[in-house]
């Protein structure tokens, strides 16, 4: 007895070999991690009705880590971090020259507001290299491949 098979089934294939597009994507991620440029902080907690303090933490190597502290009336604390290439506000991907990361803005402030309204103190830190420019590279390599200001 033979069993009929359906031609409608998708054939099973082996995992694909990386293409130029895959390689471009991977190389772009690696460049972003190694050479991310500082981005402007376009929004601040007080734009959302949140009281906050600018805070500064000295690292052992002398680099000052910057952040915001959004106080709440509780003993609960959430420490937030951000992915590359964002900063503590988010990412201005809707503006040049940062549109190559999807072309849209990332804004973390609404989430901070939700956490604050839920009763949490929010401590928001910026990655060392992606904070305000204070004349240092923050522990990351400067981008020597491209001319800069």
Image (spheres, rainbow, N blue to C red):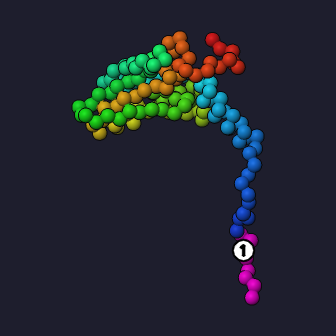
Question: In which image quadrant can residue 39 be found?
Answer: top right
Point 62% across, 27% down: residue = 34
Query: Quarter holding the C terminus?
Result: top right
Camera-side residue: 98 or 141? 141
Look at the image and tell me in which quarter the N terminus lies. Answer: bottom right
Q: Taking 135 as reference, is 59 left or right?
A: left
Res 40 seen here: no
Task: Give the SS element for disc 1.
Answer: loop
50 in the magenta segment: no
Q: Is residue 128 visible?
A: yes
Q: Percent position (x, y) of residue 140?
A: 58, 22
- Judging depth in this view, the residue of 99 and 130 nearest the camera is 130
Horizontally, residue 97 falls left or right of residue 91, namely right
**Residue on which disc 1 sits:** 6
Find residue 19 and report its image quarter.
top right
Residue at 29% over, 39% down: 118
Residue 138, image x, y percentages: 53, 19
The magenta region covers 1-8
Residue 51 in the figure: left or right of residue 63? left
Main SS of the magenta segment?
loop
* 128 and 72: which is toward the camera: 128
Image x and y of residue 6, in percent:
72, 74
Quick one: which residue is furthest to the bottom in this view? 1
Q: Please state the horizontal and vertical placement of residue 13, each as a whole percent of the image.
A: 73, 60
In this rendering, the answer to whether 15 lies above or below 46 is below
**Magenta span includes 2:** yes
Residue at 23% x, 31% y: name it: 73
Q: Residues within 10 Å of mark 1 (few under 14, many from 20)?
A: few
Of all residues, the one furthest to the front in this rendering is 60
State the count of labels.
1
């Amino acid at each position: 007895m033979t069993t009929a098979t359906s031609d409608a089934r998708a054939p099973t294939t082996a995992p694909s070999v990386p293409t130029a597009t895959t390689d471009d994507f991977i190389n772009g991620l690696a460049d972003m991690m190694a050479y991310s440029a500082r981005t402007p902080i376009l929004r601040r907690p007080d734009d959302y009705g949140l009281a906050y303090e600018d805070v500064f933490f000295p690292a052992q190597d002398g680099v000052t880590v910057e952040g915001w502290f959004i106080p709440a009336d509780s003993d609960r604390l959430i420490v937030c971090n951000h992915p590359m290439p964002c900063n503590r506000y988010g990412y201005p991907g809707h503006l040049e020259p940062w549109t190559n990361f999807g072309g849209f803005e990332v804004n973390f402030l609404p989430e901070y507001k939700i956490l604050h309204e839920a009763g949490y103190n929010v401590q928001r830190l910026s990655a060392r290299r992606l904070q305000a420019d204070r004349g240092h590279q923050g522990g990351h390599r400067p981008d020597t491949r491209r001319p800069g200001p």
